[in-house]
Image: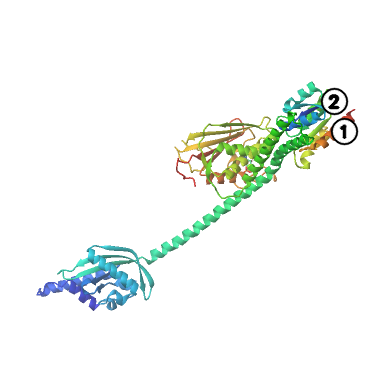
């Protein structure tokens, strides 16, 4: 079964390569949204199995997007994985992130193997 | 003294055979003249050029200056009174005066005296033919300028001390500026690291993709390599930006495009701007002239101002930063309340204006007077040091520019930096 992943991150090059890598496994179908203010719309249209969210983004940050998903009955059951290039522990354990119910936080640069394992775990838990 | 009188009389001996009463009046006049000569506040002497330049006149002040009494001087020449070097020099001048039949002025000459040591003199010598035209005298007036010379030597020494102290102050200021910059570098480091991690993340994904084996028919490969190349450039650019920024150099003024500096500075604070979701609008006039700037120091100015704006807009709903570059001819430097301007610029100067507008909380009238003071801050420790604007002002002064900080009508702060365009071909900003 092919799972659907929505990637929300303003880094266009990074998301392009992430999509290529994930789709190369032939297990995922990926949709990219570089504008975080359009993330909710994209989620409604695409109805992904999991959302990959960058934290630091212009417009709306990852915490905001996750919080709005929590408030949305259609989206609140979709698991979220956060990615961040932030450096210190204290920055990544920000309250907003924790409260937004993100199940996992991955550091950038992200190791593909770690990411794939994480996605599998999240999807397994969901089903 | 007798001798002196005799010589004086010899000079002005009236025609022989005059009446007794004439003689009486004459000797009274001589005495009067002698009194005048002896009371002159300058040294007066005369030498007989036709008699081996022996002294025939030597007044009181001359005795005082040289500490050689009149009796000892009269009838002698310079070689018998002064050191060989001095004497030779005096003789040379005397002969010049006689040969040219003209006045000669020595503004500073030095005489070795037995009692007062070295004495500095300002001397004027003139040739005078005596009444019968048989002898030619060299008459000299000497003023003792030893004190002035010493005073000006002291002044020169003081001046040197002052120059040294000034230099030291300048060095200290540059060290302070550097210290403040390293402080900013520390603060910017996390943001810069974040900015570098993004291209690194892309590179890692590229490597992952390609390490599965490269399929020559895969259209993604070319795309991935292009992205990876760009990512390396981007990481390099931002790291180099930080390294250039932290470089410790003395002031190095070079022709610079201000818009490039603005772009570089924005890159350094990109993470902070993005994190707080700040909209940045830049409007640069086309073909702005080059300015003579120290780019690392000027980036420090911009980074400080940008970070201040970021801090000020923390509670702003739609934070927006505008940066405008334009050229102008300076006129009517206004002086409003709340306006602080350094005065190196003049009306009529061709200038480039940099305006930076934020829509943050603004500055109260009271604080506006203090923002340039070192250590004045309204921020908590760890966020503000209060050194930013004082360093900004110092650096702008070093560039002979001006800075003006004022509140905007609808909230926020507008900062205007005025920089002179160097005259074409000239380099006055050194
Ligand atoms: N753009 C601005 N908007 C509002 N206040 C400002 C702005 N820039 C500077 N200030 C005020 O001036 C003070 C001094 O600034 P600065 O010398 O840079 O020190 P610091 O930023 O470390 O406090 C700040 O604490 C702040 O109160
Ligand atoms: Mg500051």
For this rendering, which residue is in front, B108 or B15?
Answer: B108
Residue lying at 25% horizontally and 69% vertically, measured from the top left: B37
Looking at the rendered structure, which numbered label has been put on residue B47? none
For this rendering, which residue is in front, B40 or B171?
Answer: B171
Element assignment for label 2: loop
Task: Give the x, y percent position of residue A102.
Answer: 82, 33
- Indicate the chain on which mark 2 is placed: A
Total marks in image: 2
Point out the frontmost of discs 1 and 2: 2
Outermost residue to the top? A45
Residue B199 visible in the current orientation? yes
Element assignment for label 1: helix
For this rendering, which residue is in front, B154 or B82?
Answer: B82
Cα distance in 3D space between marks 1 and 2: 15 Å
Task: Give the x, y percent position of residue B303.
Answer: 62, 41
Badge 1 crowding class, 10 Å Cα cut-off, few under 14, some 14 to 19, many 20 or more, is few
Badge 2 crowding class, 10 Å Cα cut-off, few under 14, some 14 to 19, many 20 or more, is few
Which image quarter: residue B149?
bottom left
Query: Compared to B102, does B368 lie above or below?
Result: above
The quarter of the picture where the N terminus of chain B appears is bottom left
- The residue wearing badge 2 is A2
- The residue wearing badge 1 is A121
* Discs 1 and 2 lie in a common subunit: yes
Which image quarter: residue B354?
top right
Task: Give the x, y percent position of residue B9.
Answer: 18, 74
**Left or right: residue A75 compared with residue B249:** right
The picture quadrant for ligand 2 comes to: top right
- Indicate the chain on which mark 1 is placed: A
Task: Give the x, y percent position of residue B88.
Answer: 31, 71
Query: Compared to A47, does B43 lie above or below?
Result: below
């Amino acid at each position: 079964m092919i799972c659907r992943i929505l990637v929300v991150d303003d880094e266009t090059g990074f998301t392009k390569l992430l999509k290529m890598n994930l789709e190369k496994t032939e297990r995922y179908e990926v949709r990219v949204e570089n504008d975080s203010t359009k993330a909710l719309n994209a989620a409604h249209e695409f109805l992904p199995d999991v959302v990959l969210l960058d934290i630091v983004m212009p417009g709306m940050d990852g915490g905001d997007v996750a919080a709005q998903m929590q408030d949305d009955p259609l989206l609140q059951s979709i698991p979220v994985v956060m990615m961040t290039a932030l450096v210190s522990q204290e920055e990544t354990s920000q309250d907003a992130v924790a409260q937004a119910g993100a199940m996992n936080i991955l550091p950038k640069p992200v190791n593909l193997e770690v990411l794939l394992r994480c996605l599998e775990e999240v999807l397994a838990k969901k089903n | 003294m007798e001798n002196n009188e005799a010589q004086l009389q010899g000079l002005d001996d009236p025609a022989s055979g005059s009446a007794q009463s004439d003689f009486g009046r004459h000797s009274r006049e001589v005495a009067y003249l002698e009194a005048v000569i002896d009371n002159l506040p300058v040294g007066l002497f005369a030498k007989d050029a036709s008699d081996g330049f022996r002294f025939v006149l030597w007044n009181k002040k001359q005795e005082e200056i040289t500490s050689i009494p009149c009796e000892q001087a009269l009838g002698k020449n310079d070689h018998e009174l002064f050191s060989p070097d001095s004497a030779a020099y005096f003789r040379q001048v005397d002969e010049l005066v006689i040969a040219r039949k003209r006045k000669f002025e020595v503004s500073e000459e030095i005489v070795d005296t037995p009692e007062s040591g070295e004495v500095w003199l300002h001397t004027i010598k003139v040739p005078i033919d005596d009444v019968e035209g048989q002898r030619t005298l060299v008459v000299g007036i000497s003023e003792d300028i030893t004190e002035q010379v010493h005073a000006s030597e002291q002044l020169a020494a003081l001046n040197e001390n002052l120059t040294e102290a000034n230099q030291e102050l300048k060095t200290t200021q540059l060290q302070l500026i550097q210290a403040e910059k390293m402080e900013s570098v520390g603060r910017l480091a996390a943001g810069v690291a974040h900015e570098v991690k993004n291209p690194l993340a892309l590179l890692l994904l590229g490597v992952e993709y390609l390490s599965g084996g490269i399929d020559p028919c895969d259209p993604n490969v070319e795309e991935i390599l292009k992205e990876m190349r760009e990512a390396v450039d981007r990481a390099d650019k931002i790291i180099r930006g930080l390294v250039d920024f932290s470089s410790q150099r003395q002031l190095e003024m070079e022709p610079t495009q201000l818009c490039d500096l603005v772009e570089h500075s924005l890159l350094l604070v990109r993470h902070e701007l993005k994190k707080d979701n700040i909209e940045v609008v830049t409007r640069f006039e086309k073909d702005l002239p080059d300015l003579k700037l120290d780019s690392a120091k000027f980036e420090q100015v911009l980074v400080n101002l940008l970070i201040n704006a970021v801090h000020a807009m923390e509670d702003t709903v739609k934070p927006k930063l505008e940066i405008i570059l334009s050229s102008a001819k300076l006129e009517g430097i206004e002086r409003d309340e709340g306006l602080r301007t350094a005065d190196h610029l003049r009306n009529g100067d061709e200038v480039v204006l940099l305006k930076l507008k934020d829509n943050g909380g603004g500055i109260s009238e009271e604080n506006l007077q203090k923002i340039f003071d070192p250590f004045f801050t309204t921020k908590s420790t760890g966020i503000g040091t209060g050194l930013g604007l004082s360093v900004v002002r110092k650096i702008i002064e070093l560039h002979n520019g001006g800075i003006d900080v004022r509140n905007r009508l609808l909230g926020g702060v507008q900062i205007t930096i005025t920089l002179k365009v160097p005259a074409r071909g000239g380099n006055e900003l050194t």
